[in-house]
Image (cartoon, grey):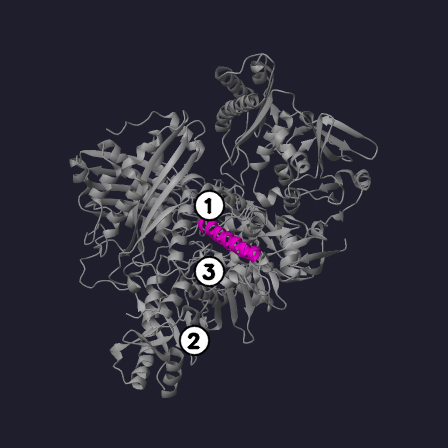
Amino acid sequence: MIDSGAVGRWVSAPGAYDIVTGKARYCPDLDFPGMLIGKLLYSPHARACIRRLDVTAARMIPGVIAVLTHADIPGENSYLYAEPDQPLLVVDEVRFQGDAVAAVAAIDEQTADAALRAIDVEYQALDGIFDPLAAMQAGAGQVVAGKDNIMMHKTYRTGDVAAALASAHVIVENTYRTQWAEHAFLETEGGVGLVDADGGVTVYSSCQAPHRDRMQIARALGLPESRVRVITPYIGGAFGGKDEAHVQIHAALLAHAARRPVRLIRGRRESILTHVKRHPFIVHCITAATRDGRLLAVKARAIVDAGPYSNATHEVLNKFGEFIGGPYTVKNLEIEKIAVRTNNPITGAFRGFGAPQAAFVYESQMDDLARKLGMDPLEIRLLNGVDTGTRMYTGVVVREGKAMKASLRRAAEMMGWQQRGELGRQPATHLRRGWGMATILKGSGMGRGLPDHAAVLLEMHRDGSVVLQSGAADMGQGIVTVLAQLAAESLGVEMSSVHVVRADTAQAPDAGASCASRQVMVSGNAVLRAAVPIRDSLLQVAAEKTGVARDRLVLHGGRLHVDGQAHDLTVAELARRALFRGYPLQSEGRYELEYPADAPEVTYRYSQEVFQFCTQIAQVLVDCETGQVAVERLVAVHDAGKMINPGGVYGQIEGGVAQGIGYALTEELRVTEGHTLNASLENYVIPMALDIPELEMDVLEMPEPLGAPLGAKGIAESPIIPTAPAIRNAILDAIGRPLYQLPMTAERVLSALDAAPCADPA
Amino acid sequence: MTDMDIRLTVNGRLQHAKAGVMRTLLTVLREDFGLTGTKDGCSSGDCGACVVVMNGQVVNSCMVLAAQADGSQVTTVEGLASNGELHPLQRAFGGTWAFQCGFCTPGMLVSCHALLSSNDNPSREEVLTAIAGNFCRCTGYQGVVNAVQQAAAELRSANAEAVLQHD
Amino acid sequence: MSAPDYRAPELLANALGIKREFGADARVVAGGTDLILRMRDKVLSPKVLIDLRRISLASISRHAGEMHLGAYVTLSQMLASAEVRVAFPALVEACRSFAGPPIRNRATLGGNIVNASPAADLVPPLIAYDASVVLASLSASRVLPLMDFFTGPGKTVMEPHEVLTEVRLPLPPPRTAASFTKLGQRRSMAIAIVNLSARLTLDRAGQMSEARIVLGSVAPTAMRARAAEAILTGNEPSDEQFEQAANMAVAEISPISDVRSGKDYRKRVTGVLVRRALMAARHKLAEVGRND
């Protein structure tokens, strides 16, 4: 093994210097000569018919350079990557509060605002359809003319659920409700469009998928993709919320029309009103078990409010169904998945992609079951947990699953699970303390049967410095660091010698989206592969120069090592000699996620097969008079396969848990009749520094045997998934009352306290 | 209404700008002085991405009219390093992974820098209180606490050394 | 809409002169943490902005039996003032609960009052401490109890030509203690669901010669729960008394539902917070007693 010392160490991100000095440029920081400010006009109604749309007056305003309506779009007026059914600019009907009606570009912000005000629109407000259950009924009217309100209705079955339920000793049956949740990436969506001299466009985009942006921009402009270039500058967070295109297409359209650079950045309110939210679910779930606590069956029906357009609804619901059984052996399962169109906010990808909602259901069910059976929550999870080799209800065989039980045991040990009551369950008359756990699995990668590949270009120069071109967007999750580490590791150079160019479609091959915790695997492996021929060239030269057999040579820290001893020859010297000899020092590496060929049939479509396992345990203190919940301690144990960048791994866990605490307790987009009432960071309440306890984290390293570079797998999504159910179960433990709705606000906890306590654990 | 002449000392340099009344300190810093390190996360004082020091105190620059700042001394993230050398806090932020996307970092750094100027050994609670107006969505706040305490230790030992050399 | 004219006079008289000339079309800007937002959202479109920063209205001083705080005193200034902390601890607790450090460095005492937000954190303790406000105009100044200042959300008795220049707080009588409690959705950067202040004064016999319960966020303006206060007055402080007063306070209010809370929850936690605030005040009294 080649070891440069870059992998597995706390290294600084390559962009750290730029970030701490304020030099890092994000979309809003970009400036070009003659640049205009772009803005979009939205409807004040959640649903309305556009009777008249007149932009003449707006176009007359001095300083207004472009005003676009749907009629001005040269290509297709629709976007979304899977099923492009959302208009870029509304044609005749506004279907939710975030539908854009017109776009303007002007010399400055005030002029752009004046242009928006000068656009004459006559809306005829229409009765919206806001209740997904009502929208499912016959005669509800159509949210989108000609399309069924039921966007998706699929059922997956395995085993014999009816028989299993009939034979069960114990059954828990509950209905769960989850909320619309907002990503609140700190940098709102933005794009800067530039027109090239040859009529093509270049777009700087705050996005997760630059190559897919390129496709969508080309489609809207009616240009071949070869004339569109997408570059990602620094990106201020995404969490799935920039997976789908947002304003980068509009920026391109405006720039193309104005023939000048256009910067289009959403304001915070606009951002909250327009981009996808985490889907709100209504889930009815029955879980059945034997007398000794073995799971027999899970039967669930999920209804989601999708908003008017498809976005990632099919995919999110698919993942929900894939994980509704949890990290448990369930032989009999039925999941009915229904997505309904409404005039509410659009919904789509958000860290976890349906798995957080599923985990809230199955991990709550597990604790309710444990209480009914008088079992310890840890015990029932260990009893039913999957392991390496378990064939799950999806048909997938877990290739590496030791972390399921290992994370449970480790988390229990860190929390002091067995001694948990000793701290005092009632520190004051009105306070109750409780402990709760949740353990989950989440797949990484797009799923079997879907394209899941990445390529990179790697080149070493004669001075030993390395440039890596990757199309993987880094929104802060740290893929650039990981790829730099892997390149350094495999070429035996210092990490500082590797320059990773931030994704630029004109230079880097497609890496697919930075989503589904996949880039470490696909782009990571692509880097390892790209490094092979370069390393071969260097070692070939080294062998020729030293006369030592190649298997005794190693590159490390920028220097040749012979039998483990540092040699005078540097990698730079070897690079110079290799180039002189004409040996290749540039290479493309391509990797497509592998699936074992001889595995049994996977019956659940698009199943993921590399799993992130993790367990979190929360200790909460509930104020029984106000319903307030304080998370006093939170233990998080996660499996990363192998940590490439520990700083990034711990950061992802902590950030995910922080988001999870918000999802559990306070975060909820309040929507009435299609109108969002709390579209601000003041009223959409996200925990701040004082609200999050000092997390106790541990990372297990159980190398993934297939499809993971050095055994490393993605960790991006799992941290947010178990937090809400762990807190829910801790509240249950504290107050003896179960909650079935997120977020568990103080108000809801107090309502729960009004109900009779459920039976004490036997 | 004509624009006003605004004079500010930003990171030790006297700067001039013309500003209409509704322009904020944030927009003048970013647009007129090119100091785009200071970020706009919400334009409403809720997120802290725009925090700068004005006359010795941290403020949300999105909530200060440029006219109100006339004559002030302002320090932004660009002013934390001196002579090209990073402040220990800036180095610590990189080393402890106190950020991921980095968009909150300029405001966070300024808040923490201000804390260190009045407290050379802040506790966890004191750091969290100092950044209670700085929102981070990526990483949470533990890395920030670690970074501040690491930088504080470094500054204390540097000061102790300086005192010894002086003696 | 045209941008307002900006003035930063050096003398109060000049500020008052502008107010005389423009009346309601001239708005005073201090910290701006609220006003700027409302102007950006076009809720307010004044013709003139009068910035008070050059006028010395940021001092904290003691005058026979009173503390005078300039309207331009920031929340951070109050937090840092030992004098304010000792004499008006509940006010300082309210300051500490307010927003976060950057906002506290800008937001002012006068601003928190003049905005007339029903949820203003400083108002309940100020009323509990019998604050009065000085309203200056070119012709005359008047001093008004803060209790009589508010008429509704965003509405006050201030005349268009007046400027709030100072808040006066009488030093509390002996054997007096006050507390502040707030229920928000997070520990910083939270607007109150309920915020309130309780103040108790004991006579030599240990009975409550005076009780104040001032509630915020549950009515169009901050309000005193007078019936609850009456239950306490003349009695010895006890858990039972506090419980009764808390229940009475709940009966006295009819709050609204908003994005932060439903009205029923507001009502209910008001009772809890009143009781806790009273207990906190009693606790402080006991501590003062021990120190005496």
Q: Quadrant of the C terminus of chain A?
A: top left
Disc on the earlier residue, 1 or 3: 3
Q: Is residue A104 visible?
A: no
Q: Which residue is mark 2?
A: A465
Q: Quadrant of the N terminus of chain A?
A: bottom left
The amino acid beneath tag 2 is Ser
Camera-side residue of B63 and A493:
A493
Q: Which chain letter matches label 1?
A: A
- Specify start and end residues of the magenta stretch as a single range: B141-164
Q: Is residue A262 magenta?
A: no
Measured as percent of width and height from the top left, residue A144 is found at: 44, 49
Q: Mark 2 and mark 3: span between their CA atoms? A: 28 Å
Q: Which residue is mark 3?
A: A207
Disc on the earlier residue, 2 or 3: 3
Look at the picture and state if B139 lies above or below A302: below
SS under mark 3: loop
Q: Which chain letter matches label 3?
A: A
Q: Which residue is mark 1?
A: A343
Measured as percent of width and height from the top left, residue A519 is found at: 36, 62
SS under mark 2: loop
The amino acid beneath tag 1 is Asn
SS under mark 1: loop
Q: Which chain letter matches label 2?
A: A
Look at the picture and state if A423 lies above or below A253: above
The residue carrying pointer 1 sits among few (fewer than 14), some (14 to 19) or many (20 or more) residues within 10 Å by Cα, namely many
Image quarter of residue A667: top left
Measured as percent of width and height from the top left, residue C166 is found at: 73, 33
